[in-house]
Image: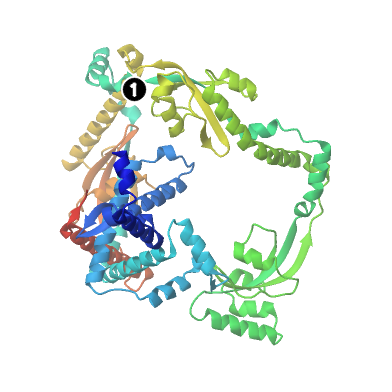
Amino acid sequence: MLQDIRENSQGTIAKIIIGLLIVSLSIWGMDAIIGGFSGEPEVATVNGEDITERDFLRLVQIESQRRLANMETPDPSLLNEDQIRKDVLESLIQQQVLTQDANEQGLELSDSDIDALIRQMPQFQIDGKYSPERLAAAVRNMGMGIAEFRQTMRKQYVINQIRAGIAQSGFAAGENASQLLSIQNQTRDFRTLTIPAESVADQVEVTDAEIQSYYDDNRSSFQQPEQVDAAYISLSLGALAESVDVSDEELQAYYEQRSDDLAREERRAAHILIEDGADADKTIAEIQKRLADGEAFSDLAKEYSIDTISAEQGGDLGFAGRGVYDPDFEEALFALEPGEVSAAVETSFGVHLIQLEDVRRSEVPPLEELAGQLRGELARDKAEERFAEVRTQLADAAYSAENLTDPAEEFGLEVREARGITRDGGSAPFDHEGLVRQLYSEDVLQGGYNTELIDIGDNVSVVARVREHRDAQQLTVDQVREDIRGVLVTRKTREALADRAEEIISSLEDGQSLEDLEAGSWQAFEEQGRTSPEVGMSVMQTVFSMARPDEGGVRYGKNVSPEQAVVVALDDVREGEVDQDASEFQQLTQFLASLEGQREYAAYQQYLRNKAEVERP
């Protein structure tokens, strides 16, 4: 057979086939040939259009990186990969549905439209000018090509146009805003009678039989969870720095190197702050012209600056060092020479013109005063250079070791112990979910191995092993007797307080006057709003949950906690005032309209999704 293949491979037909393959490879590449037979794999089809596996996997990677970046301490082991894949696929399906809808409506952007949008995006600009290099770098960091990014922009923009059109069409009637504000601003007149827990203490008794009954009814609540006792060693940058020696010569050289930083420079600035708006450029130009004509900066600050406090002092802000002002403001200020005025500087407060009035420098403190601080900084700098190397060495040593004693001795670390660690964690460092997961893994729990070296915080790494494992066990009634007693005392106290409050309310509703009942103990409150600081929040919730009393009548209610019961006598309800010309009314109306618009767009999205034909392989 092999001989037949060898002979046939020399034939004319075989040579033609090979020639065609070579031409195809040279023009389209191997992917094109393979793809010609199999096509690009898809993860779903939406109304006949495929969502490719390549797009899906790329977005899964991007979403995973985004969720890691949002973690306080990034740990890939905490990611739920199945949930990420599910969320990304549903997002792609929804995007495909919306894109198809936009296409059906004839919404599209030309290449020139896309170019104009990209050029206007600040993230692709340097000093206010479009930078192709910045665009290329940003797109590359997203794991995309330029053409793919342009296409994504094209899809997203038309989708946003539809979203904005629907969301902005939301409408809220002024009556709705008026009603909400009237309820929100409502005030109430009421009186309260407080019954302390001590007044019913003689009515509260818990027997052994009740404790046993509660235990029998709630046995599952009295289990000691599965636990482990663990040994661990910890490597930290701080501890490593403490072991670093810093010679007097190194300290002297570092002190001299830092002398410029240690001599704190402070600058006295004055500014004119203009509100950022359509006329800001015109106003700034007008001020700059008047400065050029010789008018004093302080006079113009008094006339133009919206920072009224500094304006009264001619814009003077006093002396300040670095780290005080907005970064853009600081950068402009520290680039000026005394008497010089900056160009316009935009910050979150508005647009500034800054004048540097004076500069002063403090003397460098003697080395003796700073020796401790500088020695610590230098030791930490040295330790940072060694930390990554030592961490790698410790990870290797702990992985192959049959205990923690040997790697601890090798790296001068202390073996410590933690007890009672459950699957939900324990005291630090076992409050780290990734470390606990490792501790309860089969290799560590059953196999007797060390955990991997886990980074639990900023420059802190831990490796641990199980010393003792205890299965979950049922606690006896004697072990939890006092805990149950406390629960029952609290319950019975609350019940007794509620009964006493009901007795008082019944007496009041039967005609007994407030003055005759618990005379002198009632407190009166008038025109109290929902967030009144004079009465506890829980009591105020009770007051505002009570129905309006009949004209001339009183409505009674109660608020009960384990500490006290409060009887409430509601006398009057006053509707809140509503000023339809006030900004509060306008803002609420706009907010309600926005909510309605968002609700309509969400319903529109769901409608498109429900009627879409989605197929998954």
* Residue type (three-letter) at the residue carrying disc 1: Gly
Q: How is the image coloured?
A: rainbow
Q: Position of residue 122 (x, y in %)?
A: 50, 68
Residue sitting nearer the eye, 343 or 296 = 343
Q: In this rendering, does residue 526 appear at all?
A: no
Q: Quadrant of residue 100?
A: bottom left
In the image, is 560 to the left or to the right of 122? Answer: left
Query: Where the N terminus falls, by quadrant?
Result: top left
Q: Quadrant of residue 95?
A: bottom left
Residue at position x 83%, y 37% in the image: 248
Q: Secondary structure at mark 1?
A: helix
| Whether residue 299 is situated above or below residue 322 in the rendered picture | below
Q: Position of residue 602 (x, y in %)?
A: 24, 60
Q: In this rendering, does residue 310 appear at all?
A: yes
As drawn, the residue found furthest toward the bottom would be 293
In the image, is 374 to the left or to the right of 284? Answer: right
Residue at position x 32%, y 65% in the image: 591
| Whether residue 125 is situated above or below residue 281 in the rendered picture | above
Q: Position of residue 509 (x, y in %)?
A: 17, 42
Residue sitting nearer the eye, 351 or 250 = 250
Q: Residues within 10 Å of mark 1 (few under 14, many from 20)?
A: few
| Whether residue 567 is situated above or below residue 106 in the rendered picture | above
Residue sitting nearer the eye, 77 or 225 = 77
| Whether residue 347 is situated above or below residue 486 in the rendered picture | below
Q: Position of residue 428 (x, y in %)?
A: 50, 29
Q: Which residue is mark 1?
A: 486
In the image, is 60 to the left or to the right of 251? Answer: left
